[in-house]
């Protein structure tokens, strides 16, 4: 799991995916709360046939205090997809990108994620990303890395940039 308030959690998970396909593994990535053509999605679909990527969100910010019903519906559809991926056993690695945020925002329940952790096949490498990981999910994870922000250019007013943030 990659969590914390720093930049680079998804990037670290994508690095694992790249390493895995380099060794012939099949990788699935389910992105929660993302619906934009992020650079990784475009690159994967264009050049990396060993990785399947699915987005379960829309291209809009989610209001943590009052999430739109569509955001909840898309996240729940994503969890259905995750269950199917786990059940099919055709992938060696499954990345649940921004799943911790989806839990934190109430789009997905903590128990749904714990169920995936506890029922996945032993040979499936499961990678979770997103800030604000719940203590119970952290407790069940085999590896947890915290990405800590020391300094960020957003604080200088630099906005998100194509190819860097998305």
Image: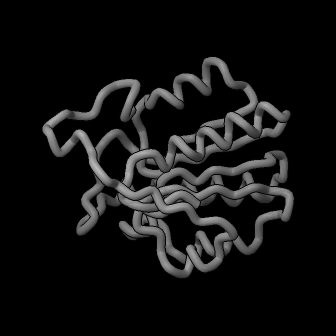
Image quadrant holding the C terminus, namely top left
**Left or right: where 86 falls relative to 29:** right
Outermost residue on the top side: it is: 46
Which residue is painted at 60% across and 79% down in the image?
139
Q: Is residue 72 visible?
A: no
Outermost residue on the left side: it is: 157
Residue 103: image x %, image y %?
45, 68
Q: Is residue 10 above or below residue 147?
A: above
Which residue is painted at 19% across and 34% down in the image?
158
Residue 42: image x %, image y %?
52, 24
Image quadrant holding the N terminus, namely bottom right
Residue 147: image x %, image y %?
45, 56
Q: Is residue 23 above or below residue 9?
A: above
Q: Is residue 161 above or below residue 28?
A: above
Q: Is residue 148 visible?
A: yes
**Left or right: where 34 falls relative to 20:** left
Camera-side residue of 42 and 147:
147
Camera-side residue of 126 and 71:
126
Outermost residue on the front side: it is: 150
Camera-side residue of 158 and 86:
158
**Left or right: where 164 falls relative to 144:** left
Residue 84: image x %, image y %?
72, 55
Which residue is painted at 42% across and 44% down in the image?
34
Camera-side residue of 37 and 72:
37
Which residue is painted at 63% across and 50% down in the image?
95
**Left or right: where 159 falls relative to 4:** left
């Amino acid at each position: 799991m990659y969590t914390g308030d720093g930049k680079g959690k998804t990037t670290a998970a994508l690095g694992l995916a790249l390493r895995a396909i380099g060794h012939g593994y099949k990788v699935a990535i389910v992105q929660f709360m993302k619906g934009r053509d992020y650079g990784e999605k475009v690159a994967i679909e264009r050049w990396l046939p060993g990785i399947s990527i699915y987005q379960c969100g829309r291209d809009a910010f989610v209001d943590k205090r009052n999430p739109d019903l569509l955001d909840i519906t898309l996240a729940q559809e994503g969890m259905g997809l995750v269950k199917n991926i786990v059940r099919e056993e055709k992938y060696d690695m499954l990345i649940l990108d921004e799943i911790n945020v989806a839990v934190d925002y109430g789009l997905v329940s903590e128990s749904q994620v714990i169920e995936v952790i506890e029922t996945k096949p032993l040979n499936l490498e499961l990678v979770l990303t997103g800030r604000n990981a719940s203590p119970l999910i952290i407790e069940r994870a085999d590896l947890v890395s915290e990405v800590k922000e020391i300094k960020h250019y957003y604080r200088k007013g630099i906005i998100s940039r194509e190819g860097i943030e998305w």
